[in-house]
Amino acid sequence: MSGASFASDNHAGVHPDVMAAIVEANVGPAPAYGEDPWTARAEGLLRREFGADAGVFIVFNGTGANVVGLQAMMRPFEAVVCASTAHINVDECGAPERFLGSKLIDVATPDGKLTPDLVEQAVWGVGDQHHVQARVVSITQSTEMGTVYTVEEIRVLADLAHGLGMLLHLDGARIANAAVSLGVGLGELAREGDVDVLSFGATKNGALAAEAVVVLRSELAVSAPYVRKQSMQLASKMRYASAQFVALLEDGLWRRNAAHANAMATRLAAGVREEPGVRLGLPVQANGLFPMLDPDVTARIQERYPFYVWDEGTGQVRWMTSWATSVEDVDGFVAHVREVTAAGPSSAPTMAE
């Protein structure tokens, strides 16, 4: 098995500058529960990105960030409209439903992106006491399929949601990769898109157990501190998570990390695009590829490199790059893919032979 992994950007370690920030924060005592100077600095930097009036709540992980953000937006008889591939729908073990008591209305999409038409079709039974009431539209940026919403696409969804008396939530586990792909700042993406609540994912961007809920609609921020505590996402020694945001945001490390991850995905796509056994399908817009492979080809590549089979029915797999993926990692992976596809079908003997 190779030392490189293309399974997840969560497989990457902590960026050295972020790790150094954690170590530097580990000096002497400091007030608990976010009353420390590192948290004050981190919150200030996040407000520099998202706006001076943004509510900022640092949490442990992405699922926690989504649960806290959504819980601040809705009541148990209300529902969330999301893509069927959304992380909140398929990869959080039912956490939103369990802790919010709310229904997720999942919508099939061709590329992981909701559209106004898809949302409108999912919103019905308004005012009928027998039906859950759609309250939140939740999108992921970049999506679980590696695609990216433009700022205008987000704004159109926000306008629709607000016109229907709903709110817009953005799962930003890879918001850094999306912002770099679009050539915009974090705040521009959120503010111009008129997002109400979002998560800013630091973990996939080089951090360790550090995410933030950012509330851009002031009335929703009132309950967020209590929701965070009740959701078991309030860190006592918060300075260690906060120091990581300082390292990422102070001089643009978040952007450099995301730009590198995206560039490695682009390089990987270019390297395998012409291979006859690889069908890329979806555009490569951030740091993920979702090609179609024959199962035999997948199995032989996985003998050396770890990655996930995304859809066993279609043969779709997922290849992810990260801030830590090197040019040598990508070129070695491409060479192995070419070697496997050039060899043709497996020559393993059949039972008849």
Image (cartoon, grey):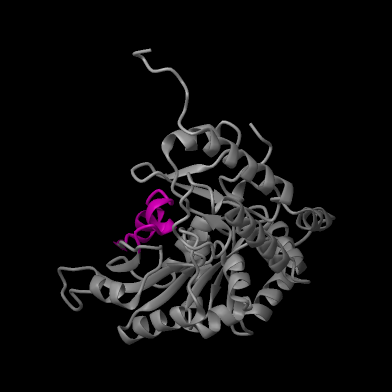
- In the image, is residue 350 part of the stretch drawn in magenta? no
Quarter of the image that includes the C terminus: top left
Pick the residue in front: 9 or 163. 9
Quarter of the image that includes the N terminus: top right
Residue displayed at 43% across by 17% down = 349
Q: Position of residue 185 (x, y in %)?
A: 64, 78
Using the rendered view, name the quadrant where residue 266 is placed. Answer: bottom right
Residue displayed at 81% across by 53% down = 23
Q: Position of residue 342 (x, y in %)?
A: 54, 37
Residue 59 makes an appearance in the image? yes
Pick the residue in front: 259 or 199. 259
Residue displayed at 49% across by 63% down = 283
Using the rendered view, name the quadrant where residue 340 is placed. Answer: top right
Residue 339 placement, left or right of 221: right
Residue displayed at 69% across by 50% down = 325
Pick the residue in front: 210 or 100. 210
Residue 35 makes an appearance in the image? no
Magenta residues (range): 83-106
* Above-or-below relation of 344 to 234: above
